[in-house]
Image (cartoon, rainbow, N blue to C red):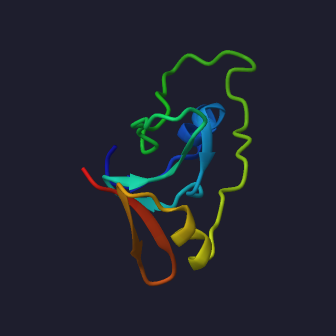
Amino acid sequence: MENGKAIPYSIDKLQDRGKFFVDPNEEIYEGQVIGENTRSDDMVVNVTKTKKLSNVRSSGADDKARIIPAIKFSLEEALEYIQKMSMLKLLQNRFVFVRFI
């Protein structure tokens, strides 16, 4: 995963793999936990990846992104959710989960 903003197109394409903790266009950075996988294992994804654009357009290919709202935790909920291999990083107006590598 790279530093940058979460791209709505990438979030839309990855929604079937789990629930997200970040909203579209939210700043993210390497090592941040951005969601919960539907399976028990960890999965590394890149939500900063943009859609490949070309000159050729087909009808119906550019569907609107239908993004499920992100899960937002209170501080108490986040402390309960956190696991041994993660930490909670407090920022100015939000907090994020970070995975120890």
The total of numbered circles placed on residues is: 0
Residue 77 lies in quadrant: bottom right
Residue 39 location in percent, x, y? 56, 32
Q: Is residue 31 above or below residue 82?
A: above
Residue 64 at x, y percent in the picture = 73, 37
Task: Give the image location of residue 65, x and y in percent.
Answer: 69, 39
The quarter of the picture where residue 12 lies is top right
The residue positioned farthest toward the left in the image shown:
101
Residue lying at the far bottom of the rendered structure = 92
Q: Residue at x 55, y 57 (%)?
A: 22
> Residue 21: x and y, percent?
57, 56
Q: Quadrant of the N terminus?
A: top left
- Residue at 46% x, 27% y is 52
Residue shown at 74% from the left, 41% from the top: 66
User: Is residue 55 depicted above or below 26 in this figure?
Assistant: above
Please tell me whether residue 12 is drawn above or below residue 34 in the rendered image: above
Measuring 44% from the left and 53% from the top, which residue is drawn there? 33
